[in-house]
Amino acid sequence: MNVPTGLFFTSEHEWVKMNGDIAAIGITDYAQGQLGDIVFVELPKAGDTITQMQTFGTIEAVKAVSDLFAPVSGTVVEVNDKLADKPEFINQDCYGEGWMIKVKVSGATSGLLSPEEYRQKIAE
């Protein structure tokens, strides 16, 4: 499983990359591998508010539909509109073209896992 450095993770298998107070969010390589072929993603709209560890959308794969959990709280500033037509980007490049939303973070970012902690979690 690909667990890049420079990112933080949730126990629910989302990743977050901080750039100042803007956080890019997506699902991990482990999560996309468990889901299989992703066919649809429901994401919030720009301007929506998300709350840390609350659902912010759903992801549908051939195998199952799963909730997406926010790693941080804040206001959605950008949505990856490419995923509406090409949700397979999540399977192909979950840390790159498969990012889901960008959020202007408000509040603490506590409770996130380091790459090492996340690797331990998925090894269990």
Image (cartoon, rainbow, N blue to C red):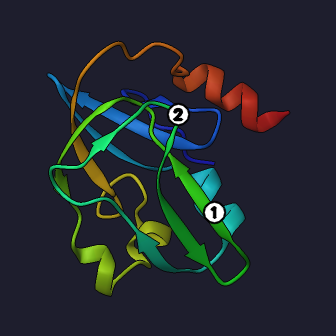
Instruction: Provide residue 88's location: percent of width, then percent of height.
Output: 44, 79
Name the quadrant of the C terminus.
Answer: top right
Residue 33 x, y percent position in the rendering:
65, 63
| Residue 97 higher or lower than 9, as above or below | below
Q: Position of residue 24 (x, y in %)?
A: 28, 42
Disc tally is 2
Q: Quadrant of residue 37?
A: bottom right
The picture places residue 48, in percent across and down from the top left corner, at 23, 49
**Quadrant assignment, res 78:** bottom left
The span from disc 1 to disc 2 (Cα, nearest Å) is 14 Å
Q: Say the numbered circle drawn on residue 49.
A: none
Report if residue 28 is visible in the image.
no
Contact (Cβ within 8 Å) of mark 1 with mark 2: no
Amino acid type, mark 2? Met
The residue lying toward the viewer, choosing from 66 and 39, is 66
Q: Is residue 99 left or right of residue 68?
A: left
Going by the numbered disc 1, the residue's amino acid type is Ser
Q: Earlier in the sequence, mark 1 or mark 2?
A: 2
* Above or below, comparing residue 37 to residue 98 in the picture: below
Taking depth in this image into account, of 105 and 99 the one nearest to the observer is: 105
Query: In the rendered image of this protein, does residue 60 appear above or below residue 120?
Result: below
| Residue at which label 2 appears | 53
**Residue occupying the far right of the picture:** 124
Q: Residue at x 39, y 17 (%)?
A: 109
Tag 1, which secondary structure? Answer: strand
Q: Residue at x 14, y 22 (%)?
A: 20
For the point 34% across and 29% down, which residue is it?
Answer: 73
Residue of label 1: 66
Residue 102 seen from this side: yes
